[in-house]
Amino acid sequence: MTHPFPFSAIVGQSEMKQAMVLTAIDPSIGGVLVFGDRGTGKSTSVRALAALLPEIDVVAGCPCNSATPAAVPDWAEGVGTEIVSKPTPVIDLPLGATEDRVVGALDIERALTRGEKAFEPGLLARANRGYLYIDEVNLLEDHIVDLLLDVAVSGENVIEREGLSIRHPARFVLVGSGNPEEGELRPQLLDRFGLSVEVASPNNIDDRIEVIRRRDAYEMDYDAFMAHWQGEDASLRKRILEARKILRAIETPDATLRDCAELCVALGADGLRGELTLLKAARAVAAYSGAETVGREHLRTIAASALRHRLRRDPLDEAGSTTRVARVVDSVLA
């Protein structure tokens, strides 16, 4: 079995990689939206990160990746009590996927052959405790977007149809990617992503050469390439696990809360989700760097990713969202 391209071997794209790592430390940040050019490592990053993370313990045969036998849904049949380890799931949600495929549906074959009503789980069940990846998320059909919004809010998938009444946990890190030139994302879904990242093809010749060199080595001499980067990935995995352990112990001064609020007010961000995401992401940055207190340096590090997609459009300000956030950060956190 071929292992995904190592996360540590991805050249550049530091903001995208930082956002992925932070959601691995604290999944409640709310996922990552990656917008930019094709072929810049968006899909590679999410698969590489999932492969980097430690395996999760699940009940063998559970369609929802339940951690304990008590958590297995009562509709899941033939599931025992054995606990096994499996890689963190990464589930692709393709464009054009039907509603039944996403949320699950009546098992037609079983209904026809045995006359029984049974539930066939969908992609949301398989993504529980892992990642749900949507390429070209801005082209997703509206009714699928509505489904995702409902599940993202509740963390539970509820199916009421054809005499079935089914529910199961559906908590996952949502990662979406796309090209803004091909269409905009609905504001409701945009707001659900905790972090947003803009990626572009590298302009530096040396960086482009290094991308080619590493990809070619991965394909031409897989064993040697993986042996070379396994140590780097192991170190990164260790840092993520250590950050998870200390995350809840990170001290949050009132001054940091005030900074979060003042940043969002100055930027005109709607609602309070901006402050909450900014705080969670900054706290994850602090944990990742081994700090005991979350402060202004951590807010500066993550402010653009947490806030650029929450800005109102200003027809009198032609500066990009990243520039606008940087300007306000420099002013408020001076």
Image (cartoon, rainbow, N blue to C red):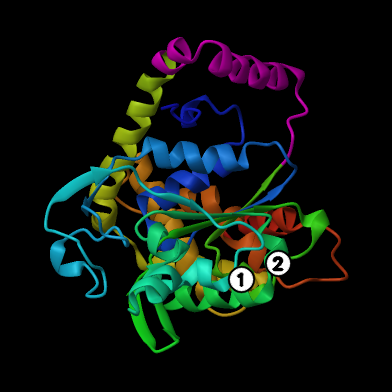
| For the residues bearing labels 1 and 2, Cβ distance under 8 angstroms | yes
Q: From this viewpoint, is residue 15 visible?
A: no
| Residue at figure coordinates x 14%, y 68% from the top left | 70
Question: Which part of the image, by quadrant, shows the N terminus?
Answer: top left
Residue in the picture at 75% in, 43% down: 37
Whether residue 44 is visible here, answered yes or no, is: yes
Q: Which mark is residue 189?
A: 1
Q: Is residue 315 above or below residue 209?
A: below
The part of the chain drawn in magenta is 200-227
Judging depth in this view, the residue of 238 and 119 nearest the camera is 119
Give residue 127's position: percent from left, percent from top.
Answer: 41, 58
Q: Secondary structure at mark 1?
A: helix
Q: Main secondary structure of the magenta part?
A: helix
Helix, strand or loop at mark 2: loop
Residue underneath mark 2: 185
Q: Amino acid at mark 1?
A: Leu
Q: Is residue 15 left or right of residue 6?
A: right
Q: Residue furthest left?
A: 81
Q: Quadrant of residue 14?
A: top right
Most extreme residue toward the bottom is 163
